[in-house]
């Protein structure tokens, strides 16, 4: 059963606010689990796609001529959550609350002070060799500023196919066909592959970044403020594109934004961060329609509305 409601932003997009009937916990009736299913034969549940446990990423504050550590900026402090395959988790919070540090730690670009990140059951910080290469393939990222992340001297063909060639997914003679398919996937013309990044608008450049992210057929994409720099109409188009690609390739998104109004369009679940910690979490419709924390209420109240 699905109940449709208008969300707090007056939007009636059926994909956003769909209240699902709660799933009743299944309890063994008339006997214990052990009697019904022998423990050895009970199928074990697959691990979640991502499991972050008590993650702390702290940056030392150095003082004095000997650069003594006088304290820490606790950018991420005791964060725990799980994500399933195909899920979109929105991470919201004001500037400086630790969203990018969280994503950079999951990407192994920052070393955590403590805590763990598991991806499909594997400890991300212990990965080496082939497993690490596979992780680099399975997890992709799209940043806010496509201009800064696209090499201006490389053609779109090179940008899109470099990763596929490195990972040996295609032969050099297949590069043009592969690039054409990726460009079509993100709503651009195949002949765009012969141009360079400067020859595109901001929205088109972000589509190219998304095409590069899906080129390696990842399981998950981290979108760190991926639509924040786009104007409203282009932002909506790129969000729609992300939703189409999610369905087509069964992608999970960790969707990071300081603007809670953006995640209402895309997230299944939301975590709200404040000063490095999670202050509220839950299904998107619950957090948006019935926020419990004053901080979440303030974030929702801060979303600009036309005519408000
Ligand atoms: N390399 C670093 N060294 C020291 N402090 C850092 C470093 N990177 C981030 N910080 C600090 O960690 C805190 C969290 O920063 P972070 O970039 O994760 O915030 P954010 O939520 O992504 O903000 P925004 O929405 O503005 O992108 C900030 O106080 C920032 O100054
Ligand atoms: Mg950030």
Image (cartoon, rainbow, N blue to C red):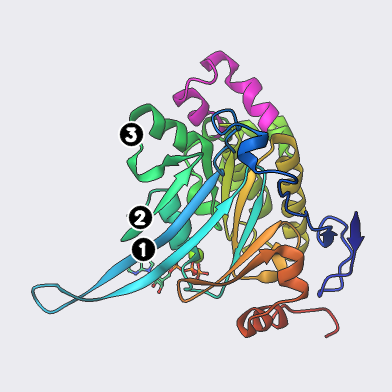
Decide: marks 1, 2 in contact (CB < 8 A)? Answer: yes
Relative to 41, residue 34 above or below: below
Chain part drawn in magenta? 160-182
Q: Earlier in the sequence, mark 3 or mark 1?
A: 1
Secondary element at tag 1: strand
* Residue at figure coordinates x 88%, y 57% from the top left: 14
Separation (CA) of disc 1 from disc 2: 8 Å
Which residue corresponds to mark 2? Answer: 110
Which quadrant does ligand 1 occupy? bottom left
Q: Which residue in the protein does label 3 denote?
A: 128
Mark 2 sits near ligand 1, with its Cβ under 8 Å away = yes
Query: What residue is drawn where x is 84% and y is 57%?
Result: 21
| Residue 171 in magenta stretch | yes
How many neighbours does mark 1 have within 10 angstroms: few (below 14), some (14-19), or many (20 or more)? many
Are discs 2 and 3 less than 8 Å apart at CB?
A: no
Q: Nearer the viewer, residue 279 or 130?
A: 279
Mark closest to the chain's N terminus, 2 or 3:
2
136 with respect to 187 (left or right): left
Q: Earlier in the sequence, mark 1 or mark 2?
A: 1
Marks 3 and 1 in Cβ contact (< 8 Å) = no
Q: Which residue is mark 1?
A: 57
């Amino acid at each position: 059963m699905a109940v449709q409601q208008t969300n707090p932003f007056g939007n009636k997009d059926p994909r956003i606010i769909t209240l699902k009937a709660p799933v009743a916990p299944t309890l063994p009736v008339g006997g214990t689990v052990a009697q019904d299913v022998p423990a050895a034969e009970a199928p074990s549940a697959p691990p979640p796609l991502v499991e972050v446990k008590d993650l702390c990423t702290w940056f030392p504050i150095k003082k004095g001529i000997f650069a003594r550590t006088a304290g820490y900026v606790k950018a991420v402090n005791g964060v725990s959550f799980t994500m399933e395959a195909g899920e979109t988790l929105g991470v919201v919070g004001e500037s400086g609350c630790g969203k990018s540090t969280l994503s950079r730690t999951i990407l192994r670009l920052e070393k955590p002070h403590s805590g763990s990140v598991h991806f499909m059951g594997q400890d991300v910080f212990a990965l080496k060799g082939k497993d690490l290469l596979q992780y680099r393939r399975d997890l992709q990222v799209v940043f806010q500023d496509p201009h800064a992340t696209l090499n201006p001297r490389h053609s779109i063909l090179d940008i899109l196919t470099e990763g596929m060639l490195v990972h040996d997914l295609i032969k050099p003679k297949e590069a043009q066909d592969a690039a054409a398919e990726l460009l079509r996937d993100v709503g651009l013309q195949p002949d765009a592959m012969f141009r360079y990044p400067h020859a595109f608008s901001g929205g088109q450049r972000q589509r190219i970044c998304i095409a590069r992210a899906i080129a390696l057929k990842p399981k998950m994409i981290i979108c760190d403020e991926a639509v924040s720099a786009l104007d409203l109409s282009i932002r909506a188009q790129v969000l729609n594109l992300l939703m189409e690609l999610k369905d087509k390739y069964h992608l999970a998104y960790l969707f990071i934004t300081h603007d809670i109004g953006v995640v209402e369009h895309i997230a299944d679940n939301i975590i709200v961060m404040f000063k490095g910690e999670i202050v509220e979490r839950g299904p998107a419709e619950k957090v948006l329609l019935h926020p419990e924390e004053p901080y979440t209420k303030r974030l929702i109240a801060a979303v600009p509305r036309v005519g408000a």
